[in-house]
Amino acid sequence: MKILLIEDDLDLGNGVRIALSEQGMEVVWVRTLDDAARSLARDGCDLVLLDLGLPDGDGLTLLGQLRRNKVPGDSGGLPVLILSARDTLDDRLSGLDGGADDYLVKPFVLAELLSRVRALARRSYGFDGETIEVRGLVLHAPTRRVSVAGRTVELTASEYALLKMLMMRTDRVLTRRVLEEQTLPGSQTNASNTLDVHMANLRRKIGEGYIRTVRGIGYVIDLQAPGGAA
Amino acid sequence: MNRLLRLWRAVAEPTLVRRLMLVQVALVLVMWGGVIAVLVHNGGDSSSYLNAIRSFDAVISVADNLASQPALQQQSLAKIDAALREEFDAANLKELGPLLMVWQGDRLVYHSKGAPPNWRPGRAQGMETLYLGDKRYRALTVYSRTSDTRVMAAGPVGTLNVFMTINSRGYFLLPLVISLPLLPLPAWWSIRLAMRPWRRVAQEVAARGPQDLTPLTFRPPHRELAAMVDSVNALLLRVSQSALRERSFIADAAHELRTPLAAMRVNAEALQGQANGPVQRELLNGILSSGNRAGRLVGQLLQLMRSDATGSEPHAPLALDALLQDRLAALSGLASRNGVELELAATEPVRIMGQRESLVSLVDNLVENAIKYSPPHCVVRVGLAGVAGRAVLTVEDQGPGIAPELRERVFDRFFRDPQQTKSGSGLGLAIAASAAASHGGTIALSDAQGGGLLATVLLPLAVIPAQAGIHT
C-alpha cells in the first residue's frame, strides 16, 4: 500500500514515515502542498495523510482540489486522513465536510493511526471490489458474499449491512445510534430491540469471537482477537 | 432585628441622590443663616421703631407745639408713646417695647413708664448703647432742626428681640421656613428624574454576563455620562483585546506543542518495536507515558481556555444520551488499551440545553479519569437518566476512590490527591466542574458501591418534550 504523507514538521514526518514503513507500507513524505500535488500527479497513491497547517497553504485546499478532481492522477475517491493539532468540533467538522475520510488529532497513538489507516485502506479496497478479511471472516463486497473460515454464510440485507459497517471500521466502536440510523432505516419504534435481534442473529451465523458488544454504547470488531489487543 | 439592620444599612448606604440633596439643603441653610446673620447684625440698630423717623418727627412737633401747655403736651406724648408700644402690648411683650424720652433744653419733659430719668440724650443725633442695670439698650436720639427738643427711643437688646427683628424685617423668610421641610420630596424626585440616564447605564452594565466585553449599547447624550460610557467602552475594548491576545497566545502555544509531542510519541513508538530487552522497553514506556501526560495536559489547557472563552455562547437543545454514546465509543479505544471495559446504561432519551464542546469535555474528563484510575479488567459504568426535571449522569469506577475530606478540593485547578500514584494534571475535574456550572448543573463525588468513585452530574433538563426527534 502506498501512502502519501504531507507533513511539514521534520521530526513528526520522519517518525511517521519510519513507523509506517516498519508496518510494510510504502511511504512518500512531502512537506509542502506543491510537492504533494507533484507527487500525486507523477506517482499517485492509495491513501493521503494530510497535515492542515502547511508552509504554502492550508491542507484543506488540497483536499478540496482532490474532491473536485482538480488533481491529476486521482478520480476523487482517494482516502484522506487528516492529522491536525486543531481539535475543536468545528475543526473536525470542517475537515470531514471538506471530504476527509477521517480526522486524527495530534498527538496521536501510533496504534490508532495504524488502525485507521488500515480501516481506510480496507474501505477503499472494498469499494474497489476487493474483499475485507478479519481473522478468517471474509466479506466480498461486489457479490455480497460472507464466509467464515471458507464456509459461506447466508445473511439478510440488514445483517449484511451491519457486518459491512463493522468490518470497514475495525477496532472502532460504532455506536448503537449510528448502526441503527445507517442500517435499519425506517424502524422508528423499538429500534434498539431490532438492532439487538439483528446482532444476535448475525452472531449466531458467523460465530462468537468476532463482534464484541460494548454494553449500552455499541459494537466493534477487533482486528486482533480479544485479549491480544494491547 | 435583622430587618432593622437591613433597613439601617439601606439608609446609611451613601447615594449620589442623597449627597446632592444634602449639598443642596446645606447650601440653602448656609444662605439662610447668612441672611439671618446680616439681619441680626443690623438688627440691634434697626428695630422697627428705631427707624421710624417720622414718629420722631411727630413726637418733636407735638413737644414743640404744645410746649406752652405742659399738661396737653404730656397727654399727647403719652398717647404717641402708647401708639408706638401698641404691638408689644398686644403681643404681651411689654418689656420689649421702646422707651420714649423727650427733652426740651435740659429739661426732661416726657419719659415712658420704666424709663430711668437719669438718662441723658446722646451728644449728637445717632445710635448709642445704654444700660439700665444689667439690661442693654440701643437708643436712637433725634435732634429737632428748629428747636432744642431732643427725642430718644431705646429698645432692649436680647435674643427675643432678634426674633422680633426677623419677624418684622424678614417677612420674606417666612415662606422659606415653611417650605424648607417640604423641599426634600420634590428635590429628591427631581434629582431622581434627572439621574434616569445614569440608572439606565448602570442597569445595562449590571445586566451583562461576566464574559460579555462588547461595548455598551446605550450612550446617553449628556456630556458627563457620555464621557463615562466612552471610558467604560474603551476599557472594555482594551480588556477584550488583551483577553483575546492572551487566549490566542495560549491556544497557539498549545497547538505548537502538539506537533512536537506527536513527533516524540511516534518516534518513541516506532522505536518500541525494535527495543531489545526489558530495560529499553521500560525506558521507552517512561518516555511514552510522559508524552501522554504532556499531550493530555495540552488538551486540557485548551479545553479550559475554551470553557473560559465560550461561557457566554448560546446553548442549544441537544440529546445527551446520543452525545454520551458517541463519546464513550470514541473513548473505548483508550479503555481497551488500559484493559478497562466501558458500560453505558441510558435507556431513555435525555435532552438538555447545552454547548456540545463543553459537554464533551465534561464527559471526556470524567470518563478518562475513571478509566485511568480503574485497575485492569474492571468496568467503568456510565449511567444517564432524567429524574425530576434533571438529567442525572453518573460515572462509576472500581478504582481507589477519593478520601471524603478531599472531595471538594479535587475540583480546584491543579490540585491532586497527595496519596495518588497515577500521574495527572489535576485539571480534569476542574474542567468538568466548570462545564457543569456553565450548564447550571453540579458535580458531586461519593463512594461507589463496592469501593471506587461515583461522580454524579446533575444538569437541568430542556423544557421541550423529551420525545421530540432524538432517535430517528
Image (spheres, coloured by chain):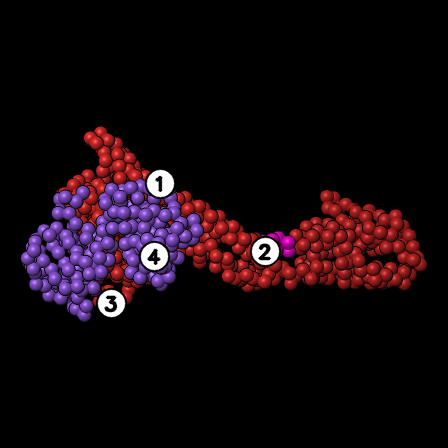
Q: Amino acid at mark 3?
A: Gly
Indicate yes or no whether the magenta region holds residue B25: yes
From the image, which quarter does the C terminus of chain B lie in? Answer: bottom left
Q: Colour of chain B?
A: red
Same subunit under labels 4 and 3?
no
Residue B428 locus on image (x, y percent): 30, 44
Please name the residue shown 37% across and 61% down the image. A70
Decide if residue B286 is in sight here.
yes
Main secondary structure found in the magenta portion: helix
Label 4: state its secondary structure. Answer: helix
Bounds of the magenta segment:
B20-28
**Residue depicted at 17% across the width and 40% down the height:** B375
In x, y percent, where is residue A126? 20, 59
Disc 2 residue type (three-letter): Ala
Q: Earlier in the sequence, mark 1 or mark 4?
A: 1
Neighbourhood count class around disc 4 (C-alpha, 10 Å): few under 14, some 14–19, many 20 upward: many
